[in-house]
Image (cartoon, coloured by chain):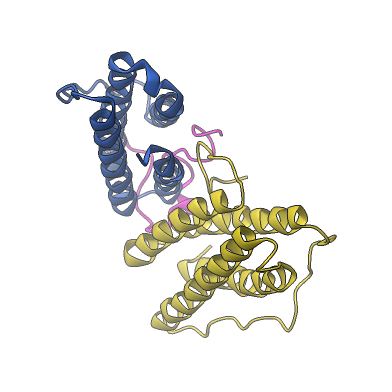
């Protein structure tokens, strides 16, 4: 996998993450589940920031950043706060692996950026009641 | 976690984004691995010393001792047989209170996390960089638990 391919994979993952955290946030109640709502809002902002930064990184390589899909599959069911939380946690696990792959397939500044992104995603898992891992973002 | 297979820095050259050689005993990543092992062992030893001095900290620091042991083991398995991984690092001065010990450990863990990230940037092998990066992220996940 080339560095640009890895960056494009990460961008595709972030497009999906922005979409999904938006959907999850819309399902959460700010008044009845304030902690979950805040965590989802924070995650949405973080993924949007990563998406924008990845777009810049890919453009700097002279490539066209991959576009977002019109829609993404939504995990079901999403009827309870616990199901919303679990969907968000699974999303963060997937993104962490994507950033692990990005670290593996880049060098220099791109890798440094991926290391920071992995770190942020790993810590975000805790916001969704994830448990600390030995090697978050390691290959499956 | 199979650090000696998936994350072996001496794996196939095709997995190396920089195109650098990976199979030689003089690979610069060996030096990085040994440096990382030394840093991890020193930080783990500091956590163990803090638990010995202040047993009440065991519930907050034992997981870190386990984490550092797992990380050191993964790195040791990644280094070619015959490479010396014994690094002598002095223990920090003992803390005078439980609060001070926790603060010192938090600072040591943050420094180790940052050092592992720096080593990951320098690594020639992509899988090895990933291994170091996942170790740094594992430490970051535990830093909130050290907040006083």
Please identify the quarter of the rendering in which residue A38 is found: bottom right
Q: Residue at x 61, y 68 (%)?
A: A13
Q: Residue at x 57, y 61 (%)?
A: A39
- Quadrant containing the N terminus of chain B is top right
Q: Residue at x 47, y 74 (%)?
A: A49
Instruction: Give the percent coordinates (x, y) of residue B85.
Output: 28, 23
The reply, left or right, for residue A69 in relation to residue A48 is right
Instruction: Give the percent coordinates (x, y) of residue B119.
Output: 29, 47
The reply, left or right, for residue A105 in relation to residue B47 is right
Please identify the quarter of the rendering in which residue B68 is found: top left
- Quadrant containing the C terminus of chain B is top left
The span shown in magenta is B1-25
Please identify the quarter of the rendering in which residue B96 is found: top left
Q: Is residue B87 above or below residue A129?
A: above
Instruction: Give the percent coordinates (x, y) of residue A43.
Output: 55, 65
The reply, left or right, for residue B133 in relation to residue B105 is right
Chain in yellow on the image: A
Of helix, strand and loop, which mostly describes the magenta segment?
A: loop
Q: Residue at x 39, y 81 (%)?
A: A60
Q: Is residue B69 above or below residue B12?
A: above
Residue at the outermost front position: A31
Chain in blue on the image: B
Q: Is residue B126 magenta?
A: no
Instruction: Give the percent coordinates (x, y) of residue A85.
Output: 69, 55
């Amino acid at each position: 996998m080339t560095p640009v391919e890895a960056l494009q994979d990460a961008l595709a993952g972030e497009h999906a993450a922005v979409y999904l955290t938006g959907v999850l946030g819309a399902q959460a109640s700010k008044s009845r589940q304030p902690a979950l709502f805040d965590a989802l809002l924070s995650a949405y902002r973080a993924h949007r920031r990563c998406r924008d930064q990845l777009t810049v990184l890919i453009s700097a390589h002279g490539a066209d950043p991959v576009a977002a899909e019109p829609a993404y599959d939504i995990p079901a069911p999403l009827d309870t706060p616990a199901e919303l939380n679990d969907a968000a946690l699974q999303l963060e696990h997937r993104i962490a692996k994507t950033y692990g792959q990005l670290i593996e397939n880049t060098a220099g500044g791109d890798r440094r950026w991926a290391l920071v992104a992995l770190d942020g995603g790993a810590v975000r898992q805790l916001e969704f009641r994830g448990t600390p891992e030995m090697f978050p973002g390691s290959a499956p | 976690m199979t650090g000696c297979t998936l994350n072996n820095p001496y794996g196939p050259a095709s997995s190396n984004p920089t195109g650098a050689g990976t199979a030689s005993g003089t690979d610069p990543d060996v030096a990085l691995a040994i440096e990382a092992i030394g840093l991890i062992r020193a930080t783990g030893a500091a956590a163990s010393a803090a638990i010995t001095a202040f047993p009440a900290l065991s519930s907050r620091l034992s997981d870190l001792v386990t984490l550092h042991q797992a990380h050191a083991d993964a790195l040791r398995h990644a280094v070619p047989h015959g490479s010396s991984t014994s690094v002598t690092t002095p223990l920090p001065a003992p803390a005078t209170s439980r609060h001070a010990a926790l603060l010192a450990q938090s600072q040591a863990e943050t420094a180790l996390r940052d050092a592992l990230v720096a080593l990951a940037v320098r690594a020639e092998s992509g899988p090895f960089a990933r291994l170091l990066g996942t170790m740094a992220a594992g430490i970051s996940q535990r830093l909130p638990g050290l907040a006083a």
